[in-house]
Image (tube, rainbow, N blue to C red):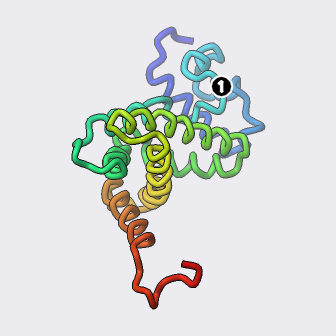
Amino acid sequence: MPRWESDARGRLERAALDLFEAQGYDRTSVAQIARTAGLTERSFYRYFPDKREVLYAGDELEAHLVAGVENADPDLTPLDALLTALGTADAVYRPREFLLRRAAVIAASPALAERDLIKLADIADALAPALERRGVEPGRARFVIDLAIAISRRATSRWLVTPDASLAELVARAAAELREEVAPRAPEAAAPFA
């Protein structure tokens, strides 16, 4: 086994995804992933703390979003600052094909679905202080993050299957849909419980 491991991380990610698709997450071992990638188990653990982490971008997305919020125009609302950052997340995303395949693997594995929720919560935890540094009250920051996550999920799921649309366009479209849903309606169109 050579000491120099060209694109070892990428090879491990691709090998893991191939194996998870072929035989399932639970039936795939770290040893199999490493062997398929042409590496050792020890090499695997240099890049990932455990098997679940091999499908995630690490801290790149979190750091990208926090920097985006911190560097956003100070005149933007908290939600618009966060949406602007989310609209550029494709700069750190893996290729669409990888993300589509990854989404299917995650959906088929309760352990990975749980890790996905934990990763999302970690990102929310990192974004809250960034919004607070912009003067947003902590409770409001969490509310804004929850709204942005809902918008992001809708936009990202569309982005994965709409190659001709940019993520920024789809974030803007999903945000407009949310705003339309919560906009005041004429009295005759109001919900009966309103």
- Left or right: residue 135 versus residue 145 is left
Amino acid identity at mark 1? Asp
Q: Position of residue 143 (x, y in %)?
A: 49, 50
Q: Nearer the viewer, residue 80 or 111?
A: 80
Residue hosting label 1:
50
Q: Is residue 145 above or below residue 126?
A: below
Residue at x-position 35% and y-position 50%: 83
Question: Which residue is found at the position 36% from the left and 60% from the top?
Answer: 170
Q: Residue at x 31, y 35 (%)?
A: 70
Determine the image quadrant of residue 91. top left
User: Percent position (x, y) of residue 151?
Assistant: 45, 57
Q: Residue furthest right?
A: 27
Q: Position of residue 69 (x, y in %)?
A: 33, 39
**Above or below: residue 176 compared with residue 146:** below
Q: Position of residue 191 (x, y in %)?
A: 53, 82
| Front residue (pair 7, 70) | 70
Left or right position of 158 against 72: right
Could you tell me which quadrant the N terminus lies in? Answer: top right
Q: Nearer the viewer, residue 134 or 178?
A: 134
Secondary structure under tag 1 reads loop
Q: Relative to residue 105, is residue 4 drawn left or right?
A: left
For disc 1, the neighbor class at 10 Å (few under 14, some 14 to 19, many from 20) is few
Q: Report the quarter where the C terminus lies.
A: bottom right
In-front residue for pair 124/135? 135
